[in-house]
Image (tube, helix red, strand yellow):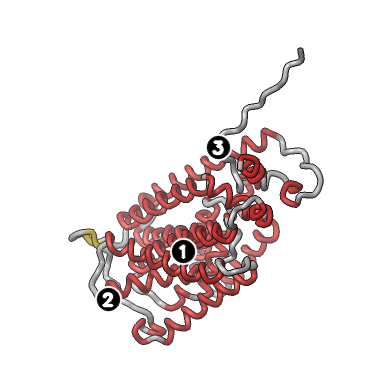
Amino acid sequence: MVGAREAVARVGEEPDVVTGEGAPAASAPAGRVSAGWKVLPIVEGLVLLIALVLPWVLQDYLTVFATRVVILALFALSFDLVWGYAGIMSFGQALFFGAAGYGVALLARDLNVTSILLILPAGTLIGLTASLLLGGFLLLGRYPSSVIFVSLGTLTGSYAADRLARGWYYLGGQNGIPSIPPLTLGSYEFEEGPIYYYMVLGILVVVYLLCRFLVRSQFGLALAGLRENEQRIAFFGYKAQHLKAIIFAVGGTIAGLAGSLYAFHEGFVWPNMLGVVFSTQVVLYVLFGGSGTLIGAVIGTVIIEGVSFWLSDNYRDVWPIILGVLLLLVIMFRPLGLISFVLGERERVGSFGKAPKETGNAAP
């Protein structure tokens, strides 16, 4: 398997390697690649630094808004794993997000369970279960699933869940479940404000680091090859559909965690949390920021939500049109997202392990 591993590691380095046509082209200048690798941790550090100081410079209502954005960034992270690293276009990511939100809302309403030590594991488990069921049905069939089949399957699941929630009286119908009590830790209640913000930010940082470790592991190496050339990965003996199902379940788990936080932060859940519109929204986050980089999903969420907030406050009649034109321009001229202004395409794959030592044969 050493030869297979080396071949997989080369996937994505050059276009000719991916297509298999001809000999590999000349590699990019070494300075550009090394500079790109130095940029990624700088971008991540700057984003974290800005996030840490925000509550000190923002007004209270903006801190509440920033908390919502951080939760949505966690949601976007789940989709970036699924699409940016495994190439699965999930138009139903909101299904796991909303299912966890409704699940923890029912726990709070019917069983009076509000402890963060129970709510977050419950929401995570709901997201994991829902993604395993849907992913098993769509991805683990007798024959490999096509991209269109999985896209339409997740879209159908999200739409069905939306309609079910709207028509089920136990779930509140069109009105959803209002008046969810705040999260608690013992006798302490997490109220909206800086403490809630830092708690959510801490969760995002932990999940981000785990995702970064995952995509830079041997499993991430297989995912990188899967995204670039699925047929070649299957030829090397990897079970491509099983890899897809695993990362699909991981993405659903993170979406469930985000959904449970969102439900308690907003204080209510409603059918739109499960629907197609919310699923499309997270696609735009990742597409705008840059897929396959993790940090691009976070940046895309922050910029879209921030610009939407500002436009809706200053241009109430035409702000959706302005936002739509902005998104269209970015997609047309920077298809790899805003993060591509500072990061090279090579970093979507990354490096794995230590570089082999070059040994030269000296002439006698």
Residue drawn at (66%, 60%), measured in percent from left and top?
331
**SS at badge 1:** helix
Q: Alpha-carbon distance for marks 3 and 2?
A: 49 Å
Q: Alpha-carbon distance for marks 1 and 2?
A: 24 Å
Quadrant that contains the C terminus:
top right
**SS at badge 2:** helix
Left or right for 116, reference 269: left
Q: Nearer the viewer, mark 1 or mark 2?
A: 1
Left or right for 264, reference 237: left
Q: Tags 1 and 3 in contact by the CB under 8 Å rule?
A: no
Is the residue marked by circle 2 packed among few (<14), some (14-19), or many (20+) residues within 10 Å? some
Q: Tags 3 and 2 in contact by the CB under 8 Å rule?
A: no
Q: Mark 3 points at which residue?
A: 353
**Does 5 sit above or below residue 231?**
above
Residue drawn at (46%, 76%), measured in percent from left and top?
272
Which picture quadrant has residue 270? bottom left
Under mark 2, the amino acid is Arg
Left or right for 136, reference 176: right
Q: Tell me where residue 352 appears, x and y as whole percent.
A: 57, 40
Q: Can residue 144 be seen in this view?
A: yes
* Residue 252's disc number: 1
Under mark 1, the amino acid is Gly
Q: Nearer the viewer, mark 1 or mark 3?
A: 3
Q: Going by the picture, which residue comes out furthest to the top?
A: 364
Q: Mark 2 points at which residue?
A: 109
Residue drawn at (74%, 48%), measured in percent from left and top?
15
Q: Tell me where residue 240 appears, x and y as whole percent.
A: 59, 58
Quadrant that contains the N terminus:
top right
Q: Which of marks 1 and 2 is nearer the N terminus?
A: 2
Q: Can residue 344 be seen in this view?
A: no
Q: Earlier in the sequence, mark 1 or mark 3?
A: 1
